Image: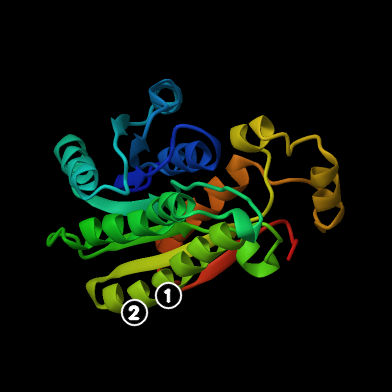
Amino acid sequence: MSTATTRTAVVTGASKGLGAGIALALAEAGHAVVVNYRSDAEGASRVVDQIRAAGGRAVAVAGDVSLPADVRALFEEARVTFGPVTILVNNAGIAAFAPLETITETDYRRQMDTNFWSVVLTTQALAAQEDVTDGAIVNVSTGGTYQHPAFASLYVATKSAMEAFTVISAKELGPRGIRVNAIAPGPSDTDGTRSSGFVGSDMEAASIAATPLGRSGRPDDYGSVVAFLTSDGARWVTGDVLLVSGGQR
């Protein structure tokens, strides 16, 4: 484990995939990590066990971060367990792809609430901590905001809203010493993309062919970037959206 000053980090949607990779990287950087999950208690427990086995501190906390009451409870438990939250990674998200004409109001509410409204709620919760004057927020967007793939109109729209919110909230929170950035991951090899059939498909092969570094992303590729953005080494970086895609754009 790192000997860096321990801070309290909340990672939403951290029971698997990119969120798990980010949680592990932040723990390796020396931070106490709150592994948030909505339904995958078993996955969250595995992430916590990995962190503790490596000598770190972590706890799993259930909660739907699109609900104000759950966000309040998440931050209260984090504070009681480890102290005020000074690192927040908004990773929880839903990626659903469909033709424009099939999108329903239910689809809209589901993706907008999880992909965007949750980011507003958790950012408000971190900022509401009056004793926090040095914080870092990283929002997980998508490389789709650069590539604009077909059948991703709703998903990319919610992430585009997140990116705009990132830039504007960085301006509002900067005077408090709270930095806000985002990363835009490219196509990746995760639990979700494996279960969806993307990994090993012709679509992944085409994606890899279009990626200068010649492979799909992995959770640890993103974890190391988030660890940097939340570190003192990135103290002069705020209001930025960093494309992390192996060069695919």
Can the viewer see residue 231 in this picture? Answer: no
Label total for image:
2
Q: Which mark is residue 167?
A: 1
Name the amino acid, label 2. Lys
- Classify 5 as above or below 147: above
What secondary structure is marked by label 1?
helix
Could you tell me residue 55's position as x and y percent? 39, 26
Structural crowding at the residue carrying mark 2, measured as other residues with C-alpha within 10 Å and reported as few (<14), some (14–19) or many (≥20)? some
Up-down relation of residue 97 to residue 247 (above or below): above
Could you say which is closer to the camera, residue 217 or residue 103? 103
Q: Is residue 130 left or right of residue 178?
A: left
Q: Residue at x 49, y 36 (%)?
A: 20
Split into 4 quadrants, where in the image is the N terminus? top left
x then y, percent, for residue 240: 49, 72
Secondary structure beneath disc 2? helix
Residue 58's quadrant in the figure? top left
Q: At 53% across and 65% down in the image, what residue appears? A: 157
Q: Residue at x 42, y 75 (%)?
A: 167
Relative depth, front residue between 141 and 96: 96
Name the residue carrying label 2.
Answer: 171
The three-letter code of the residue at mark 1 reads Val
Q: Is residue 54 visible?
A: yes
Locate residue 8 relative to residue 241 in the image: left or right: left
Left or right: where 219 falls relative to 14: right
Residue 164: percent from left, percent from top: 45, 73
Q: Are marks 2 and 1 in contact (CB under 8 Å)?
A: yes
Give the quadrant of the C terminus: bottom right
